């Protein structure tokens, strides 16, 4: 497995699954319109950044590729984190998000529920899930072997919310190109 090193980050070549636009749209109705949204794992071409701006949200994006390490960087003013973090650092990402004591919505593989970290981290805090009826297709192969959900905190109206996912066949995130350029 190819691993790219950038400062203290280890980015695995297969660690990034960039979210297609159709998978961003279901979370939008749960976000307060006047909220400042921080997308900490996103370039300007992330579908999160593009869709949220299109829907009128004030969006701040940051990415390790631009020297803004999620573990050391925090924008001056923000209300909610919405993003798709690297799969390999999920426990550390959730620890950092919970340390802010602010709402968040992070797309994560449902396989994370098989790990012990959700039980430990969310023992005294409410984990909310926005679950889908279909699997998000992160690539053009259309055979992603895992389902994904938004893992949320202080955001949804109840602990588990189910949404239909309107998949757009062949739709890929425009962020793939940014990351191809970064890892060259």
Image (spheres, grey):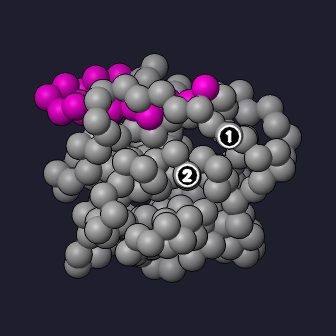
What residue appears at the point 22 percent right and 31 percent down from the top-left corner? 126
What residue appears at the point 49 percent right and 67 percent down from the top-left corner? 55
Residue 130 among those drawn in magenta? yes
Which quadrant holds residue 57? bottom left
Residue 134, position as x, y percentages in the image: 66, 29
Q: Residues within 10 Å of mark 1 (few under 14, many from 20)?
A: some
Residue 119 among those drawn in magenta? yes
Mark with earlier residue (1, 2)? 2
Secondary structure of residue under mark 2: helix
Secondary structure of residue under mark 1: loop
With respect to residue 60, does 132 lie above or below?
above
Residue 144, position as x, y percentages in the image: 73, 33
Q: Which residue is mark 1?
A: 166
* Magenta-colored span: 116-133
Left-right relation of 174 to 58? right
Q: Which residue is mark 2?
A: 25
> Does residue 26 appear anywhere in the picture?
yes
Q: Contact, CB < 8 Å: mark 1 with mark 2?
A: yes
What residue appears at the point 29 percent right and 29 percent down from the top-left corner? 158
């Amino acid at each position: 497995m190819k691993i790219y090193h950038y400062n203290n980050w280890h980015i695995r070549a297969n660690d990034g699954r960039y979210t297609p636009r159709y998978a961003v749209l279901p979370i939008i109705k749960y976000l307060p319109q006047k909220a400042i949204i921080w997308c900490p794992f996103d370039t300007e071409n992330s579908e999160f950044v593009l869709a949220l701006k299109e829907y009128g949200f004030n969006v701040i994006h940051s990415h390790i590729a631009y020297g803004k390490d999620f573990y050391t960087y925090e924008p001056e003013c923000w209300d909610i984190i919405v993003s798709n973090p690297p799969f390999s650092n999920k426990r550390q990402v959730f620890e950092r998000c919970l340390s802010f004591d602010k709402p968040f919505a992070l797309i994560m593989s449902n396989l994370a529920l098989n790990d012990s970290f959700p039980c430990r981290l969310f023992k005294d805090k409410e984990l909310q899930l926005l679950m889908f009826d279909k699997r998000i297709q992160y690539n053009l192969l259309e055979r992603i072997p895992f389902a994904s959900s938004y893992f949320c905190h202080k955001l949804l109206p109840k602990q588990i919310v189910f949404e239909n996912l309107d998949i757009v066949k062949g739709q890929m995130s425009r962020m793939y190109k940014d990351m191809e350029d970064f890892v060259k």
